[in-house]
Amino acid sequence: MKVLKKVLAGAGAAVGVIAIGLAAALPASAATQGPARHHVNYESISGTLTGQGALANAPVVPLRLTGAVNTWGSINLGGNSAVSKIWTAKGTLTVWHGNPNPPPKLNYASCRVTYSVSTSYKVLGSQSTGAFWKAQGNGWATVVFSSIAPRYSFGKYKGQCNFSPKAKPLPYGAWITFNAQGPLYVH
């Protein structure tokens, strides 16, 4: 479970990045308030990574962005910085976010370990590039990490889930989901 904890430490940073990207959007009611040359819309960012890649120390989650900027990209969930970047085909979206570290939810019947990280974000338009340059917005992002812990194969605890920090999660049941949304105000 040590690998999953390392990934979770970086997840808070990644969630913040997504949240920042979504934070750039403004509510639809604000569309008439901005200058005519600006585009306002609600942005949604989502992606999933499964298998061995979800257990990497710095997993890279493929993303789909829809709304104010429609594109695809990815986010590296490694690290623990409060500033993250979403790399896309139309530029880089940089966001500031919180780094929560929630306790895992343990399922003793299936040996599933799940971390759910939710945080707010704010878009850093001056540090973004391309279509996201000088964008504004904020929102909420959630990253969920889930894996299956191995079972003890011998000894006193044979057959029980091994949730110890030294246990290596099984790759076939590992997955990460990334979801963020919020208003995005772009030029």
Image (cartoon, rainbow, N blue to C red):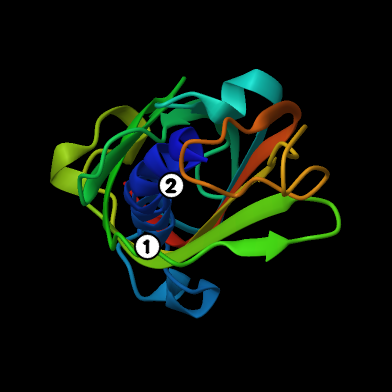
Q: Which residue is mark 1?
A: 101
Residue kind at label 2, given as amino acid type: Leu
Judge whether 23 appears above or below 51 on screen. Answer: below
Q: Nearer the viewer, residue 18 or 136?
A: 18
Residue kind at label 1, given as amino acid type: Asn
Judge whether 182 appears above or below 147 on screen. Answer: below
Q: Position of residue 38 (x, y in %)?
A: 35, 53
Q: Is residue 42 left or right of residue 101?
A: right
Q: Quadrant of residue 51?
A: top right
Q: Position of residue 43 (x, y in %)?
A: 53, 54
Q: Quadrant of residue 70?
A: top right
Q: Nearer the viewer, residue 79 or 178?
A: 79
Q: Position of residue 99 (x, y in %)?
A: 30, 59
Label 2 near label 1: C-beta < 8 Å?
yes
Q: Residue at x 30, y 28 (%)?
A: 130
The span from disc 1 to disc 2 (Cα, nearest Å) is: 7 Å
Residue reaching furthest to the front: 156
